[in-house]
Image (tube, rainbow, N blue to C red):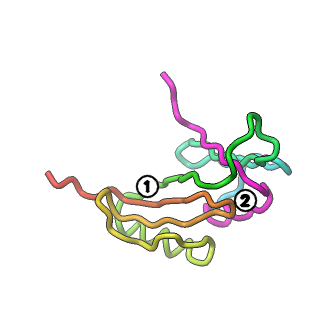
Amino acid sequence: MLTLNYILLAVSNPAASHKFYSNLLGMEPVESSPTFVLYVLPNGIKLGLWIKDEMEPRPLPAGGVEVTFSEDNDDAVRATYAQWQGKAKVLQEPVAMDFGFTFVVEDPDGHRIRVFARAADPR
């Protein structure tokens, strides 16, 4: 059975992405070089940041991927939003949508980072 446990983002500048994600996530990567940075998140999922110029096959232009983090409830989403204020460009302020309460920020390469808490099941 396939297991999704690794997200790899094409980035223009791994050093800038390292600084951005370390500041945003409040953690340091487990691996860092001039061309690649790797974080292992508390749930075990790996987030890799690879310099786009050395990826083979070549990726589409960097940016445009959405990475999503879930929280337990709306208050936790608000708390994360407050912690991330000034650390990333806000694309969507906290708002209730049909799937839940959410906000979106952007990394230096235009990748979107969404945080959300699922809406209560109406049943």
Q: CA distance from mark 2 to mark 1?
A: 21 Å
Point out the residue furthest to the front here: 60
Question: Of the residues under marks 2 and 1, which one precedes in the sequence?
Answer: 2
Q: Considering the numbered disc 2 on the image, is that residue within a helix, a strand or a loop?
A: helix
Location of residue 33 in the rendering, given as x and y in whole percent from the top left corner: 84, 48
Residue labelled with disc 2: 17
Question: Can residue 108 be seen by looking at this rendering?
Answer: yes
Closest to the camera, between mark 2 and mark 1, is: 2
> Tag 2: residue type?
Ser
Location of residue 111 in the rendering, given as x and y in whole percent from the top left corner: 60, 57
Residue labelled with disc 1: 70
> Tag 1: residue type?
Ser
Location of residue 52 in the rendering, given as x and y in whole percent from the top left corner: 76, 47
Could you tell me which residue is drawn at 49 percent across and 68 percent down? 80
What range of the chain is rendered magenta? 1-25
Badge 1 crowding class, 10 Å Cα cut-off, few under 14, some 14 to 19, many 20 or more, is some
